[in-house]
């Protein structure tokens, strides 16, 4: 599942909880990860599935999405994409209901 964000050249603040996900059915056998990609589906360094911090709950509304080392997604001359990946022995148990990307009002 890929979501297309077309706010070109803007910072999206990661540290203020600006990205979140509604999900259920997560466990050690059914996980999701979130990646940031460029318009050509190339992973952005520091925002890959291996940099993704596991969600702290097995289900919830607006669960915070975080990566290991970055607080901001750097401006890019092109739109970004958000990819949600399913993994695990029982990946069919994981459900994603919504992905939120909230930019500060001054960035809109």
Image (spheres, grey):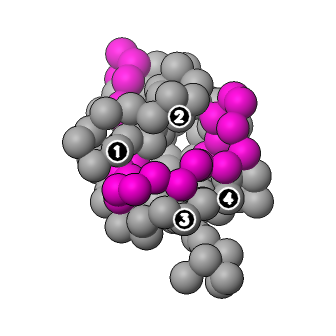
Q: CA distance from mark 3 to mark 2?
A: 16 Å
**Marks 3 and 4, Cα distance to the nearest angstrom?**
9 Å
Q: Pointer 4: residues within 10 angstroms few (<14), some, or many (20+)?
A: some
Mark 2 lies on residue = 47
Which portion, as a residue range, is magenta?
65-90
Percent of width and height locating residue 59: 58, 47
In the image, is residue 83 above or below residue 6? above
Q: Nearer the viewer, mark 3 or mark 2?
A: 3
Q: Give the camera-side residue of 29 and 85.
A: 85
Return the mark for residue 10. Answer: 3
Q: Is residue 29 above or below residue 69?
A: above
Identify residue for label 4: 13
Quadrant (top left, top right, bottom left, bottom right) of the C terminus = bottom right
Which of labels 2 and 1 is toward the front?
Answer: 1
In the drawing, what numbered circle is on residue 38?
A: 1
Residue 98 in view: no
User: Which is nearer the N-term, disc 4 or disc 2?
Assistant: 4
- Pointers 3 and 2 in contact (CB under 8 A)? no
Q: Earlier in the sequence, mark 3 or mark 1?
A: 3
Residue 93 appears at what percent x and percent y? Answer: 37, 35
């Amino acid at each position: 599942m890929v979501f297309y964000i077309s706010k070109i050249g803007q910072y999206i603040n990661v540290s203020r909880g600006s990205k979140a996900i509604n999900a259920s059915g997560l466990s050690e056998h059914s996980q999701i990860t979130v990646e940031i990609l460029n318009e050509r589906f190339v992973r952005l360094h520091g925002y890959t599935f291996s940099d993704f911090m596991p969600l702290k709950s097995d289900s919830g509304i607006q669960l915070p999405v975080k990566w290991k080392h970055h607080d901001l997604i750097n401006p890019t001359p092109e739109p970004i994409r958000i990819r949600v990946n399913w993994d695990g022995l029982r990946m069919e148990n994981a459900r994603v209901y919504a992905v939120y990307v909230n930019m500060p009002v001054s960035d809109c």
